């Protein structure tokens, strides 16, 4: 191909594009930039105005990936906590300890032959089970709230 033919082909190529070579082809895709990018005569259009902007964009993408991974890990941990505390709540409420402690306290309260110390001991045991239940309920609720917040962020 002669130089004149190359010149003609190049001029036709630029005639079909929206903007001729050398004029602004858009703005830099860098996260903190926005400077105009000049259209090259050949090749793929540039996305960034400089190597610094390209590196800033890569770092921003890497940060976003790391934040997404951290969010996913926190969400997984919170969901596991919800599952574990929910199982603990169900076991405490429907298990044998709370109903057993209630039965012991009731029996000690209605039987006048039993000493007051036995009633106090039964009530202390019941209070301990209820405090464990309350702590589990608070932990479960906090985990449920955390899951909801993390899902809203993601």
Image: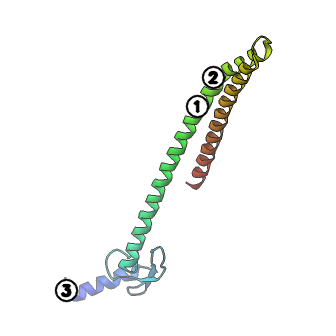
Q: Secondary structure at mark 2?
A: helix
Q: Position of residue 110 (x, y in %)?
A: 80, 14
Front residue (pair 79, 113)? 113
Question: What residue did someone put label 3 on?
Answer: 2
Q: Is residue 20 left or right of residue 43?
A: right
Q: Secondary structure at mark 3?
A: loop
Q: Secondary structure at mark 1?
A: helix
Earlier sequence position, callout 3 versus callout 2: 3
Image quarter where the N terminus lies is bottom left
**Residue placed at 57% from the left, 31% from the top?**
87
Question: What residue did someone put label 2 on?
Answer: 97
Alpha carbon of mark 2 to alpha carbon of mark 1: how far?
12 Å
Q: How many badges with numbers are in the image?
A: 3
Picture quadrant of residue 131: top right
Q: What colour-coding does the image apply?
A: rainbow
Q: Position of residue 64 (x, y in %)?
A: 46, 62
**Residue placed at 54% from the left, 40% from the top?**
81
Front residue (pair 45, 18)? 45
* For residue 133, above or below residue 144: above
């Amino acid at each position: 191909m002669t130089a004149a033919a190359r010149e003609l082909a190049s001029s036709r190529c630029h005639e079909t594009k929206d903007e001729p070579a050398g004029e602004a082809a858009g703005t830099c895709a860098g996260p903190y930039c926005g400077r105009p990018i000049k259209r090259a005569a050949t090749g793929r259009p540039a996305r960034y105005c400089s190597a610094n902007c390209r590196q800033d964009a890569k770092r921003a993408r890497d940060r976003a990936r790391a934040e997404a991974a951290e969010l996913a890990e926190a969400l997984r941990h919170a969901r596991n906590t919800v599952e574990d505390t929910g199982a603990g709540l169900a076991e405490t409420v429907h298990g044998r300890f709370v109903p057993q402690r209630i039965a012991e306290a009731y029996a000690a309260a209605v039987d006048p032959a039993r000493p007051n110390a036995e009633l106090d001991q039964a009530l202390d045991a019941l209070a301990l089970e209820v405090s464990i239940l309350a702590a589990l309920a608070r932990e479960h609720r906090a985990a449920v709230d955390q899951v909801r917040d993390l899902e809203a962020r993601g």
